[in-house]
Image: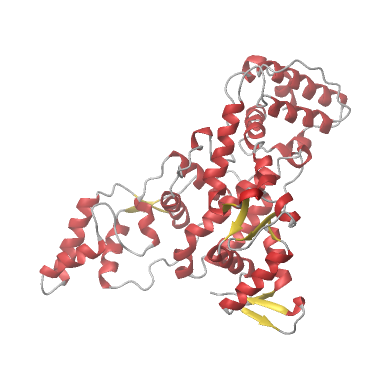
Amino acid sequence: MISNLENISIQELEGRNSINHFYPFSNKDYVAKRQFSFDEVIGRYISFLTGKKLNNLNHEEFKKECLAKFKEVLDDEQYADIVQELYFDDENITLNSILTYQLHEAGNTSQKVYEVFRSMSQFNKVDINFEKNHNFFEEIILDLLKSYMTEYKENKSSSCYLPFLETLFAEDFKFITGNSHYFVKNIEKFLELYLFIYCSQLALNLKPNQNALSTPQAKDIYFILNYEKASTERRNVVDFGYQYLYDRAKYIFPYLSLLTIFMKVFSSNDFRLYNLLEVLDESDNSISIVDNFNVKYREAKQLEALEFNSATIKEALESLLDSAYDQFKENSVVDRKGALDKYLKAFENQVARPFLQNRGRLGKILVMDQDMILLLTNISIGNKSKLRFQELMLEFKKRGICFDTKSQVELVSLYEKIGNIERKSDSGDAIYVKTTI
């Protein structure tokens, strides 16, 4: 495989940078409006989970079929039109069932967002009863809806770029599907949370360079509750908050576009940057090949010509990663900074927006509202009935989410208001947080 790296031509390295895997957004997604639909994402995900896909449903024809069924079972047919009005409008089925999400056809960006969740879902289809507690008419609609569904099986997905997150997602998802009502009510918020966790942890595991070449681990970022006051004295919130994350998000596009080249070189769509140290040894030959590749790469990207004489393979790869970012710096021969700025705007608008507040002099900070905190709390407690408060904070930290001491005090107050806290003494270690499910 290393011979492919050695023999690659400058012409093969030329052309536009692109990301083919592991990140769903492009510079076209920079606008403030969300460029994907969670309804569409959920619809695709439900097809994967159930092994069933909804095909070729004509809304008007389906309404007519339902109306005919209603008339068959109603003593007075005039009520059929009233029932129809309850469950149908011009374009949608008004039914509290997760299966109706499959009526949405996924657009391009929604498909890419779905693939993020699919990559974290290295499990077989999940057996969930989505049809609980429906009335007689709703059961008629659902039975007809199911008649349009066909068997559906996807090819095996690439696994997640972040193995630790794949494990957590599987645990959290298995838990949330254990209560179908809670799942239906919170599936969008759950996916919104994990989209942020995935993209933010991806950014934090790419920069600095040694992170990109190491097996990913959960990295801390700090939030506050959305109604809290923030100040410059809260150093973790300031130093390891949104600006810290944003400064690392700028490396997603340069580094993953370089990874796209390595995927071609090593003929694997499941290859990651941290696999490089597994396939390249410390021999002088390997170091020389990477250094020479770097020279060709810089020429192909019209960067200043440099010579490299790395002492280790890690040093050679870190220099190559620097080159990948150099092409997006201001005043480069080819101006690619504008494209990178749009990628960063896409990160902010499509990923981070639900968790951001602008706090004047402090700028943008990461916040969580009560609903998201309770969801995070419940999935962190999981199948246990309760957790010590400090154990709960460690569970948050496993997902990269941290709160400083002041925010932890506010969290305890929030839990007390909700009534899901149990004090065995005034000691912090004796505070237990209970699930709200």
The residue shown at (10%, 73%) is 76
* Residue 323 located left or right of residue 155: right
Residue at the far right: name it.
Answer: 311
* Residue 315 located left or right of residue 352: right
The residue shown at (45%, 44%) is 36
The foreground one among 25 and 274 is 25
Vertical order, 398 against 252 (above or below): below
Vertical order, 243 against 378 (above or below): above
Where the N terminus falls, by quadrant?
Answer: top right
Find residue 289 and report its image quarter: top right
The residue shown at (64%, 58%) is 168
The residue shown at (44%, 39%) is 108
Residue at the far bottom: name it.
Answer: 424
Its colouring scheme is secondary structure
Residue 147, visible in the rendered structure: yes
Residue 132, position as x, y percentages in the image = 39, 71
